[in-house]
Amino acid sequence: MMEGLAQANDLSEVIEADRAHMWHHLSQHKQYETVDPRIIVEGKGMRVWDAAGKEYLDAVSGGVWTVNVGYGRESIANAVRDQLIRMNYFAHSAGSIPASLFSKRLIEKMPGLSRVYYSNSGSEANEKVYKMVRQISHRHHGGRKNKILFRERDYHGTTITALATSGQPQRAEQYGPLTPGFVMVPHCLEYRKQWDVENYGERAADAIEEVILREGPDTIGALCLEPVTAGGGVIVPPAGYWERVQEICRKYEILLHIDEVVCGLGRTGTWFGYQNFGVKPDFVTMAKGVASGYAAISCTVTTEAVFEMFKDNPDDPMSYFRDISTFGGCTAGPVAALENMRIIEEEGLLENTLKMGARVIANLTALQEKHAVIGDVRGKGLFCGAELVADRATKEPMDERRVAAVVADVNAQGVIIGMTNRSLPGFNNTLCLSPALIATPDDIDQITDAIDRALTRVFG
Ligand code: PMP
């Protein structure tokens, strides 16, 4: 490794250029006055190399649950190359070969849904839903059914409107005023119980109904949920939750939007996270794993019933969905997505995800016996978390700096793991593991062994 780009470029020039001109995401740049910015120059399978030549086992699929099929996939690069030479772009008021074919393949995996709208990021895909819901409200409910519910701890994106649906309030704190019309419902993390009841899942879903009744059911157009909450703490909803959520949505004619930006395309061991729970959504959005980061693509998928509402009156010039995403017309995304999906299928990566996910949970559960700071272990497929606590009995959250010290120690051992959002007090105490779906038993053991050593070093 370290042959291609790494050697071809003068890396000191790259680092200098980075320091002088880059503005990294989610970064306080003062740090780069004393340490070099991290520049990842090459990747293969589950491994990446930085500019200094250090090798890392990537346990977070590119940092944010994205590179589901791993690095260095020549077949994706070749498919994209061939497509770009043939036809790179045309606005999506016209179709393209890869967009049509990917839509068909995708819908085969999503019974009950039928239409795919393309854009470029998770935030954008979610905003398409909000716009569709608002337009339905205007056209079919006299503008009244326009509120959109979102859940505490969930995250749906970075734009001002997507931030209005962030259940992690500190993310939005300095960016107001936000878009109005979004209302928060309680989270469903049983480990941090809000109700002392036996059927926790049902109770947490009933809390949504309470908000609906408070706001007025005829004012609410949609409920937007992550199937398994990602950055808010790797939260798998308890048994009974999704069944009740579905019932409530049907009862009050509220459209159910599931944000699969993280879970989509295999992360939880099924094509989509919601398919673990037997739920039937009206909207599904996806982005990260759709093309595993080989191209920017996101999809907003909906039912024929929703689609029909936008073509019921062709004589009305305001009847269609008045939205465009310029780069939703790029062909690189859908052609990469087709090949990405083929790889997941042909290499049996859903099955591997289930097996390897079970191994992560088993290893973390064994570590829990040894390290009292692990309060809770949870996950679905290769989407796992270990919540660290200062005290197991009281569940007092672990100090963020000590969780960060664990992440840094694991990193120094050559393994990249994540932690839930650093800027969010009370949310920042969960170690996150989301390796590529190609992970082997040795990879998983290497990751959890590094965590074991780090916990011993940081907590004794
Ligand atoms: N939804 C969820 C569940 C996410 O985790 C994210 C990104 N972390 C988004 C939406 C936003 O995606 P993007 O950054 O591509 O806009």
Image (cartoon, grey):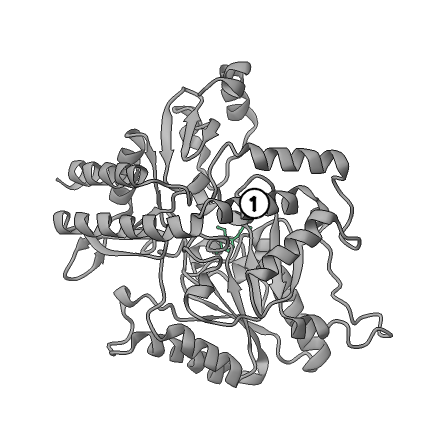
- Quarter of the rendering containing residue 406: top left
Lateral position of residue 198 relative to residue 460, left or right: right
Quadrant of the rendered image containing residue 196: bottom left
Residue visible at 46% across and 65% down? 274
* Figure quadrant of residue 445: top left
Q: Can residue 347 be seen in this view?
A: yes
**Horizontally, is 167 left or right of 189 in the view?**
right
Please name the residue that numbered disc 1 is placed on. 291
Element under disc 1: loop
Residue drawn at the location 21% of the way across and 58% of the way down: 396
Q: Which residue is drawn at 66% across and 65% down?
A: 131
Judging depth in this view, the residue of 240 and 16 nearest the camera is 240
Whether 397 is drawn above or below 453: the answer is below
- Badge 1: few (under 14), some or many (20 or more) residues near its Cα, within 10 Å? many
Q: Which residue is drawn at 51% across and 79% down?
A: 249
**87 or 322: which is nearer to us?**
87
**Marker count (numbered):** 1
**Image position, residue 22 (x, y; %):** 55, 30
State the quadrant of the N terminus. top left
Expressed as whole percent of the image width and height from the top left, the position of residue 259 reads 51, 61
Residue 424 visible in the shown view = no
Image spot of residue 227 (x, y percent) = 44, 63
Q: Where 209 falls versus 435 (above or below)? A: below
Eyeballing the image, is 177 above or below 204? above
Residue type beneath disc 1:
Ala
Q: Position of residue 126 (x, y in %)?
A: 58, 60
Quarter of the image for the C terminus: give it: top left
**Can you name the residue that lies furthest to the front here?**
346
Using residue 84 as the reference point, say whether residue 400 is left or right of it: left
Q: Residue furthest right?
A: 315
